[in-house]
Image: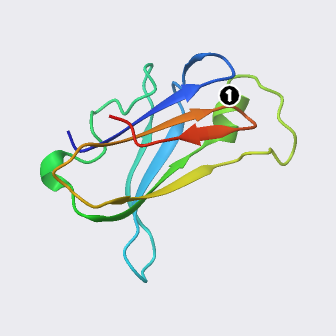
Amino acid sequence: MGLSTHVLDTMHGCPASGMQVRLYALPDGETPKLLQALSLNADGRNPSGPLIATEAMQAGRYRLVFDVANYFRDKGVDLPDPPFLSEVPLDFGIANPAQHYHVPLLCSPWSYSTYRGS
């Protein structure tokens, strides 16, 4: 199943449709390498499926960056300047590329939570 993500907007109680997300590889001692930039679909997921397919997964460190402030501004939320949360970066490791790694994000303009999902 590879690597996947799912974002839920806890302020409005819905998937974070339209949120911009970037995925980076974090090679040791090197500049982060952008692997993909995407806009989440109506279900709060990548419209083209896994972020990384199982056969392409490699062990290593990765970063997902979620553009939280712009998502909530686009929803009409009046945010302070600067917003409390602008982007939410999540750094994580893939130790076993044969396993499924799911990185969900639950977010509002003021908080977020994540975990390794199934």
Amino acid of disc 1: Asp
Q: Residue at horizontal 44%, vertical 70%?
A: 32
| Residue 113: % across, % down | 59, 39
| Residue 67: % across, % down | 60, 43
Residue nearer the viewer, 4 or 19: 4
Q: Residue at horizontal 49%, vertical 44%?
A: 21
Q: Is residue 67 above or below residue 24?
A: above
Q: Residue at horizontal 22%, vertical 62%?
A: 58
Taking the image as shown, residue 19 lies to the left or right of residue 6, namely right
Q: Is residue 97 above or below residue 108?
A: below
Taking the image as shown, residue 64 lies to the left or right of residue 58, namely right
Q: Residue furthest top?
A: 13
| Residue 114: % across, % down | 52, 41
**Label 1: few (<14), some or many (≥20) within 10 Å?**
few
Taking the image as shown, residue 105 lies to the left or right of residue 58, namely right
Say which quarter of the image contains residue 3.
top left
Q: Residue at horizontal 16%, vertical 47%?
A: 54
| Residue under numbered circle 1 | 74
Taking the image as shown, residue 14 lies to the left or right of residue 55, namely right
